Image (cartoon, rainbow, N blue to C red):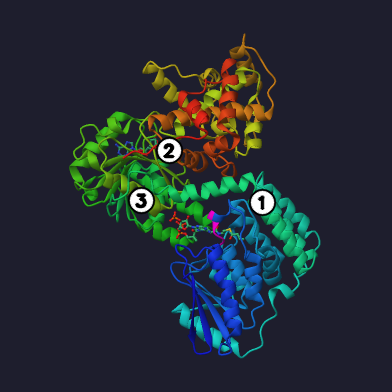
């Protein structure tokens, strides 16, 4: 049973129980319509409370039904039935009232919530718009400005803000159901408030719509849903209720079938599958109640901040008193910046810092559960750290390295109890970036690996298991991107054209702007190390720029010039001259935006196919998550693998063949050709 009705005197209590999140499946929609009729017909009932069992109020439409044809009763009709019920319904909200869940609550005559509840219309995050009156009823209830914010951002409001906006009528203390029943008893005798559908949208000031249209379009960039949602809210303020509902439904159904919605749904489910990698079932993570970070530089400070944000006490270990002070100051700076941005209060910042202990002594780590090493990227330095850690830490403490490119097997060589060791590759800034690559060695125990995934959940990160190779998943693909970007330059494209094409594809920044921002020196250092190993990395132009001291924004310039004090890239004559020299003798072509994007994106897919074949990546979704959460790949493309699959793997192979004939990319690997023949990538499951 998804819906049951019980009675508390004259109050009917409708309980939805549709785990895990009470999503509005077809069966639930039907049961709600039936509940309206039942309660309408019951003369003993004066008012009804609508509540949910389990962890949350209704979390929205059932997203898994979106790929299929809609089956009646449709959600707008369910909400209309609730709104036109003869007895007043009171929505009793705990957890989240999201999307269709909030729309059902808007059909109710009243909404009460516990203080910890959140309410929102997150549909734009799924590439759609609210499809059951959200864009029509919400502005009628809370005004157009607040509705625009809520709907076009997709971000939820906490209950107190919702109360201030008039979205909920009361916040209840104590047990929700009894408080909601008491509320229902009180309103049962009073005259019912005007139905939201019968109200008008309050007037807005002149120029309001033009201003918000500009702002929303600028923020959405190439994402379709926010602007279409705004158009619906505007329509709702201009035409009558039923015309606005028809416009909203038409827009909803159109977007529901769009490529962006399919991509965003793919990411929604991929993110939830991330914490359940194949091969981990049954492994029990260790309890992590305390943590330490060795190295308080860029990464160590960020990791320490992320651990503190999750409530763990943190010991920060540095080399000497001066570096301890600097490391602790680095962490403090992170929290102070959050205070400045209004993200946390000064009290929270102080509380976070009170949980940080800085030391140059390993003694305090004797009873620490998890130690993350983030010292210089140098094998000898890292090994020395783990040798010292092994001497002081508990035998069951989990030891992790944040190395970007070194081999975790080599780092852990000679370590006592190597089964408790693994790579935890955070991305910079570590307290902000969602991606966490989890890199087991051959000796890592399942419990240690499971601890890595449990830690990710605790920190609110997206975990992806990666095998050991140069750069793991993300940085290995990044290398291919950089090679492709230089190939483009040598064959006639300019840095400006490449960056513009990648922004047009949807990335926040092109590869050259990104390198200038991060600095060209780290990659140059890695190429030097690779040459010492006998490899032949390809970066003729970047190498030349580094030899003339052009390391990016932090030096005299990089791929671009930067006028003093400015960060806007200006095309550089010096760089153009270097490119011309390096390109001498190579055939030049005229590149358009789409071909540039293909020359960058398709080789990513090829490298990913290789990694799947090698077992470095376990699932195509993992590669999508790495690119989205670590490198700004547009969510609405679904990640490179979803993008490739949607375009058609045969087409990708043909395009790569064409590029490789002109020496503009590597030819497609066998794994990609095989996948193209099969029509999709074969799932790889490892024990
Ligand atoms: N439909 C189907 N399944 C859903 C779902 C939904 N709307 N929301 C969550 N789930 C599933 C998840 O896939 C997951 O399944 P799994 O265990 O098999 O992986 C399970 O419920 C639990 O989800 P979470 O791991 O996300 O649980 P949390 O407790 O961390 O979070 C939540 C709960 C805040 C409700 C979160 O799940 C969430 O944000 N859900 C999405 C809400 C949403 O986008 N609603 C709008 C839907 S579109 C809509 O309503 C259109 C309407 O306007 C017509
Ligand atoms: P950093 O140079 O900013 O910081 C390193 C810190 O380690 C310094 O504060 C130094 O004093 C300290 N340190 C060195 N030896 C030590 C020792 N024996 N004991 C204690 N502290 C010691 O370097 P960054 O950028 O923070 O990188 C650290 C690690 O993280 C490297 O392995 C790097 O490859 C990796 N990494 C870096 C990323 C980045 O974007 N910077 C991203 C992901 C990983």
Mark 3 vs ligand 2: CB below 8 Å: no
Q: Quadrant of the C terminus?
A: top left
- Magenta: main secondary structure equals loop
Front disc: 1 or 3? 1
Residue lying at 47% horizontally and 44% vertically, measured from the top left: 429
Label 1 to label 3: alpha-carbon separation: 36 Å
548 is higher (above) or lower (below) than 133: above
Front disc: 2 or 1? 2
Q: Nearer the viewer, residue 70 or 587?
A: 70
Residue lying at 47% horizontally and 61% vertically, measured from the top left: 346
426 is higher (above) or lower (below) than 188: above
Which corner quadrant of the image does residue 375 belong to? top left
Task: Characterize the local packing of mark 1: few (<14), some (14-19) or many (20 or more) Cα atoms within 10 angstroms.
Answer: many
Q: Is there any visible trace of residue 561 in the rendered image?
A: no
Q: Earlier in the sequence, mark 2 or mark 1?
A: 1
Label 3 to label 2: alpha-carbon separation: 26 Å
State the extent of the magenta-drawn residues as a range. 60-64
Q: Which residue is mark 2?
A: 683
Q: Which residue is mark 3?
A: 455
Q: Nearer the viewer, residue 339 or 203?
A: 203
Residue 681 lies, in percent from the top left, at: 47, 34
Residue 686 lies, in percent from the top left, at: 34, 38
Which corner quadrant of the image does residue 204 belong to? bottom right
Q: Which labelled disc corresponds to residue 329?
A: none
Q: Which residue is mark 1?
A: 255
Mark 2 vs ligand 1: CB below 8 Å: no
Residue 556 lies, in percent from the top left, at: 57, 27
Q: Is residue 146 left or right of residue 292?
A: right
């Amino acid at each position: 049973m998804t819906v049951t009705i019980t009675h508390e005197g004259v109050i009917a209590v409708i309980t939805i129980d549709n785990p895990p999140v009470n999503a509005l499946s077809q069966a639930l929609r039907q049961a709600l319509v039936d509940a309206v009729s039942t309660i309408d017909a019951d003369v003993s009932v004066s008012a009804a409370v609508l509540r949910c069992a389990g962890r949350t109020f209704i979390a929205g439409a059932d997203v898994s039904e979106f790929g299929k044809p809609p089956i009646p009763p449709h959600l707008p009709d369910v909400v209309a039935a609730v709104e036109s019920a003869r007895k007043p319904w009171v929505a009793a909200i705990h957890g989240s009232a999201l999307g269709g869940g909030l729309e059902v609550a808007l059909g109710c005559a009243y909404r009460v919530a516990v203080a910890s509840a959140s309410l929102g219309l997150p549909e734009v995050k799924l590439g759609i718009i609210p499809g059951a009156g959200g864009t029509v009823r919400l502005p009628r209830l809370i005004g157009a400005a607040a509705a625009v914010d809520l709907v076009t951002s997709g971000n939820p409001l906490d209950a107190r803000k919702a109360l201030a906006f008039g979205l909920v009528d009361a916040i209840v203390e104590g047990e929700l159901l009894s408080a909601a029943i008491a509320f229902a008893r009180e309103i049962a005798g009073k005259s019912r408030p005007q139905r939201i559908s019968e109200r008008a949208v309050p007037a807005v000031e002149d120029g309001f719509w033009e201003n918000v249209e500009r702002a929303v379009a600028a923020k959405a960039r190439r994402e379709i849903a926010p602007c279409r949602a705004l158009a619906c809210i505007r329509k709702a303020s201009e035409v009558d209720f039923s015309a606005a509902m028809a416009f909203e439904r038409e827009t909803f159904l159109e977007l529901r079938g769009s490529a962006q919605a399919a991509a965003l749904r793919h990411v929604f489910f991929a993110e939830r599958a991330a914490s359940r990698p194949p091969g981990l079932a049954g492994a029990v993570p260790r309890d992590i109640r305390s943590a330490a970070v060795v190295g308080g530089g860029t990464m160590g400070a960020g990791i320490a901040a992320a651990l503190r944000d999750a409530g763990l006490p943190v010991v920060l270990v540095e080399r000497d008193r001066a570096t301890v002070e600097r490391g602790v100051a680095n962490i403090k700076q992170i929290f102070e910046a959050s205070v400045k941005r209004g993200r946390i209060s000064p009290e929270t910042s102080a509380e976070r810092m009170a949980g940080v202990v800085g030391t140059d002594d390993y003694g305090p780590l004797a009873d620490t559960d998890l130690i993350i090493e983030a010292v210089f990227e140098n094998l000898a330095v890292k090994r020395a750290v783990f040798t010292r850690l092994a001497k002081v830490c508990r035998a069951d403490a989990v030891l992790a390295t944040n190395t970007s490119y070194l081999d975790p097997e080599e780092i852990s060589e000679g370590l006592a109890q190597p089964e408790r060791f693994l790579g935890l590759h955070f991305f910079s800034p570590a307290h902000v970036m969602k991606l966490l690559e989890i890199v087991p060695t051959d000796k890592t125990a399942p419990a240690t690996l499971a601890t890595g995934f449990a830690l990710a959940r605790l920190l609110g990160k997206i975990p992806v298991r990666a095998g050991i190779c140069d750069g793991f998943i993300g940085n290995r693909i990044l290398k291919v991107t950089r090679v492709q970007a230089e190939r483009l330059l040598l064959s006639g494209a300019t840095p400006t054209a490449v960056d513009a094409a990648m922004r047009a594809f949807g990335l926040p920044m092109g590869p050259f702007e990104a390198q200038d921002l991060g600095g060209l020196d780290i990659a140059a250092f890695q190429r030097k190390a690779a040459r010492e190993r006998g490899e032949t990395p390809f970066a003729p132009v970047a190498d030349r720029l580094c030899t003339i001291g052009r390391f990016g924004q932090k030096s005299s310039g990089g791929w671009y010039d930067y006028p003093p004090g400015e960060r806007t890239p200006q095309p550089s004559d010096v760089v153009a001259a270097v490119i011309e020299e390096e390109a001498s003798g190579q055939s030049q072509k005229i590149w358009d935006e789409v071909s540039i994007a293909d020359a960058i994106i398709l080789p990513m897919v090829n490298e990913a196919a290789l990694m799947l074949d090698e077992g470095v990546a376990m699932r195509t979704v993992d590669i999508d998550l790495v690119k989205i959460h670590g490198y700004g790949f547009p969510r609405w493309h679904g990640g490179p693998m979803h993008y490739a699959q949607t375009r058609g793997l045969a087409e990708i192979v043909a395009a790569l063949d064409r590029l490789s004939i002109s020496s503009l990319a590597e030819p497609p690997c066998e794994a990609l050709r095989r996948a193209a023949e099969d029509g999709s990538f074969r799932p790889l499951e490892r024990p």
